[in-house]
Image (cartoon, rainbow, N blue to C red):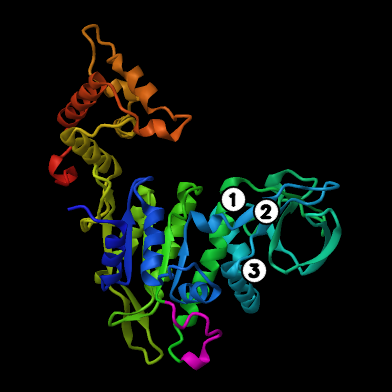
Amino acid sequence: MSKTLEDIAKQLNDADKKVQLIYAFNGSGKTRLSRAFKEFVAPKNNEGRNDDEAELSRNKILYYSAFTEDLFYWDNDLEADSEPKLKIQPNTFTDWLIALLKELGEDGNIVANFQRYTGSNANPVFNEEYKKKIKDFSGKEVEIIVPAFFEIVFQVAAGLPERFNRTADSTNDEPPVAQGQYKAIKISKGEESNFIWSVFFTLLQQVVSTLDESNVGDRVTDKFNNLEYVFIDDPVSSLDDSHLIALAVDLAGLIKRSSFTDGKGLRFVITTHSPLFYNVLHNELGNDLRRVNPDGISSWIYKRGQSEKYLLKKNADGGFELPTSNDRPFSYHLFLLAELRSAVRDGQIKKYHFNLLRNILEKTATFLGYLRWEDLLEKTADGVPDPFANRILNLSSHSAHAGEEVADIEDSDKERLAQLVSFLSETYRFKKQEVEND
């Protein structure tokens, strides 16, 4: 039975779990669910948001999503070849965040996390407070104060190939970089996303460390005392596989070490469209964790029963479902095949289903050792792969307009897709009971 996102937010809130992991395709409502969940945990009034409400929300829930990334932007209006800078948009959240990170001296940990998850040699440098002159709307020149930590310059060694930039992993055979011999660069969009995640993850590490102190009076800050939830929506969009795995292992370890006893403590909700990220977290959260106490007696920090895994589904009627997943990570191609079977069964084939079909073909061809995914298709009488392959290629190519992804498909193409799904299942013996979610 279909539910609203508000219903699912209530379902997640009512669950007595330390961590809830959700897989969903892009476009299934993950980001909207994060907003619905935040509104459920800390609702705003009908007369508009005010600073007191923003503080109440922040005290109860921290969340990371695409909206978090929107708070960071590049200053591209450079004068006199000045340094490119990544800036942070001031608001109640970023004012609170930056003040806290400054107070706790976390800039070094942000840099370490950024370089760990990107493998980048760029060194993020936060600004000190300074004054600058700008022109107001009337064209008059005025002096403003730029607060510390609201601008970041990324530096690399100047005059040397990038592979010679000194890092923690550098060998003694690499030439040294003279002090001060650096240049500012504009990092890639992927690195930017990972830097923003590193800021959030560094804060999260401090949250867990702080709340692990049971004596409230001995905590380094009281800013997290009322925190109930951390909601994380897809922090992995720009990571390669090795760094994605490292992030998933680190995040799972942090969650497992956080305090949670008898239903009390910090709770986590994580959503993702990445099958690898989901599966690594699934595995890590399935492992128990013990701690050896000062008296030499060990105690459980985390047991696998404290987690729950789900698959978020968007139904044809516009509603949603959140069934629990099984006890093991899913195989992504089997999950895609289940989605295709469901679309064929319900007569809801859309253009994006051809993307799923091509994805299955590519993964299966790689696994079976074929050079071309077309070789998996039925052959014509003269042994040539089915010419419908070109139609799949055209229908699964990236569209210039997002609306085309759900455009209507010709009936003949729908029938052919249904035939191919049946052919793949029977020829390559995919186990139907593992993929059907009726």
Q: Which residue is drawn at 50% across and 49% down?
A: 239
Q: Distance between the residues labelled 1 and 3?
A: 17 Å
Q: Mark 1 and 3 residues: CB-CB less than 8 Å, in contact?
A: no
Residue 122's mark? Answer: 2
Q: Earlier in the sequence, mark 2 or mark 3?
A: 3
The foreground one among 169 and 246 is 246
Q: How crowded is mark 3: few (under 14 residues within 10 Å), some or many (20 or more)?
A: few
Local SS, label 1: helix
The foreground one among 196 and 176 is 196
Name which residue type carries label 3.
Gly
Q: Position of residue 194 (x, y in %)?
A: 55, 54
Residue 326 at least partly seen:
yes
Residue 106 at least partly seen:
no
Q: Mark 2 and 1 residues: CB-CB less than 8 Å, in contact?
A: yes
Q: Mark 2 and 3 residues: CB-CB less than 8 Å, in contact?
A: no
The foreground one among 96 and 212 is 96
Q: Which of marks 2 and 1 is nearer the N terminus?
A: 2
Residue 326 sits above or below residue 360 on the image: below
Q: Tell me the quarter of the picture where residue 415 sits.
A: top left
Name which residue type carries label 2.
Ala
Q: Does the magenta stretch include residue 190?
A: no
Q: Position of residue 330 (x, y in %)?
A: 26, 49
Q: Name the residue under label 1.
A: 191
